[in-house]
Image (tube, rainbow, N blue to C red):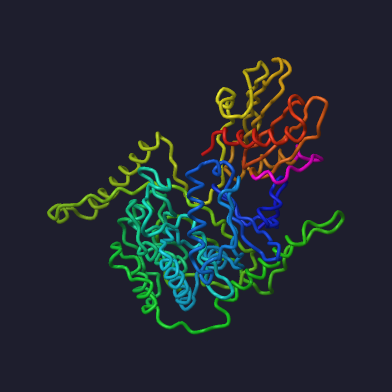
Amino acid sequence: MEQVGPGGPTHVGPFEVVGVLGQGGMGRVLLAAGPDGRLVAVKQVLAHFADDEGFRARFRREVTASRKVSGAYTAAVIDADPDASTPWLASVFVAGPSLGAVVKAGGVLPEEVVRRLAAGLTSALAEIHRAGLVHRDLKPDNVLLAEDGVRVIDLGIARATEGEAEGDTGLTRTGFVVGSPAYMSPEQAEGHPLTPASDVFSLGSVLVMALTGRSPFAGTSTLKTLYDVAHGEPDLSAVPAGLRDLVARCLAKDPEARPSPAELRELIGPVTAAGRQWPSAVYGMLTAQRARIDELLAGPPAAGDPEPGPAPEPKGAPEAVPAPEPGPVRSPAPESVPVLRPEADPVTVPTQDTPALVPKVPPLPPVPPEATRRAGPLRTRRRRIAALVAAGVLLVAGTGGVLYVRDRMNAPIVYTAVASCEVAREKLPLELRPSTLDTWSGTVDGVQTSCNGGGGTAASPTATVRWNVSLGGDAGANAVTRRRHFQSEAAGQRTASRLGFGTEGYWEASSADWTCVLAVREGNLSVRVGLRAAPYSKGACETKAKDVARAALKAAPRR
């Protein structure tokens, strides 16, 4: 949870933006306040997706789906505008860490707490299914532990169980499915039609994660994870005996063999009423979250005021248990599994972002009975490896050699190169004829290109567009490098607010040569658009510069 950077929106619809809860590859979630002072979470689609009619249709469906479900188990929708230039959806802000953040910060949950969690999630799924929806992305980061109980968030890829064909919304492409691999159902991993039973399978995986610290299908790669979801049997030896049968029934490969939410409630049994739903560490995270919200509402400190220091740690607070590293699933001995304890680290707020597209898993080919009798464990392993290799070949062939799989579902947008002038001229709303002033160069930490032209002479263009991308490190490091350069350039300039796109922006001071110059950064890329006086007034010039900057971001290659 952080302040909005320079160039970030100050208002979305009737809501005043307070801070940023999170940002991912397709959108961001803002903390905002309504006219009545109520806090809301505003999900806002990134600008270049807003121009995609298929994506906008998908967002409209999310708004419709979210409004169907009771706020008792989800975050109730307050307002939305799917037809805005930058579509947005405002829901009640639910204070509370995600299940994923809780386990990462403090360790696994005790059995009795997971039983309470299971009861709450079962009631939430019953309500979602009653509304005629399948959630399709139930995972730890979409489960909030609120003070009064559990909330299931992000209906971004929820789908009506009837009356809507798969191809109507553009959600999938041939050979791809949508979701978070480690928490998919087998039928979802293989791209088959989904029923409410798919959510029950995901529920089983979420409960295993709460009890053991990891999904029962978390493999060493996305492809391996998908294969295990579809064909592998989970190792439940670390799941307490009191919940093992419940989890095993949820994880049945056959959807018909899984219990319904009503049957799950009977299996869970009665849950004792309690004033405090969760371990004390969760309430410590809630306190830290509220303190951070108070800081954001108070605004940045005035000049000369001391910067607020870190919140003091409770006396005697034990160290955090690190999150488990990805790797083969192993079953730790029950006595070695860390149990949730008080933790003073800041809360991690889920981005509520839309999951990435992942490849379908090919079905396991049938094996003749006589072959099974002949084949020992070694041959079985070889068959399994061969199927994985075949799946990899299909993936590469189907995408022209480019792997569209992200192990981190909420990875930021990463730009891989600058736009070439020859290509960019076709995509920008400008008359940028070829110019002798066009340049391309390598820099210490990336590459830069400038395209010049317009109605002037070759030596005196009326418009210029520059791209500068930072490369050389990982996605996060590259974005930090670009931000440092960008903010150095922005020093003393006028902040460009309410752009509706990009991460931050600024306007350069006008000069005798240039009516307006706009610079915008998004991740590891910055673009700079300059326009001369003719034929623009200042107001028209700034409007034109915004249109060009938005198109310039879209013109740069990204993964």
Q: Residue furthest left?
A: 370
Which sits in the foreground, 301 or 370? 301
Residue lying at 48% horizontally and 50% vertically, measured from the top left: 58
Q: Position of residue 516 (x, y in %)?
A: 76, 32
Residue range in magenta is 488-500
Q: Position of residue 530 (x, y in %)?
A: 72, 29
Q: Position of residue 353 (x, y in %)?
A: 53, 53
Q: Residue furthest right?
A: 304
Q: Is residue 235 above or below residue 219?
A: below
Quadrant of the frame with the N terminus? bottom right
User: Magenta stretch: residue 129 in it?
Assistant: no
Q: Is residue 33 left or right of residue 186?
A: right
Numbered-mark total: 0
User: Magenta stretch: residue 492 in it?
Assistant: yes
Q: Is residue 157 left or right of residue 266?
A: right
Q: Is residue 240 above or below residue 407?
A: below
Which of the 4 image quarters holds residue 18? bottom right
Q: Is residue 446 left or right of residue 10?
A: left
Q: Is residue 70 above or below residue 42?
A: below
Which sits in the foreground, 69 or 266? 69
Which sits in the foreground, 334 or 297? 297
Q: Main secondary structure of the magenta part?
A: loop
Q: Position of residue 76 (x, y in %)?
A: 56, 65
Which of the 4 image quarters holds residue 528? top right
Which of the 4 image quarters holds residue 373? bottom left
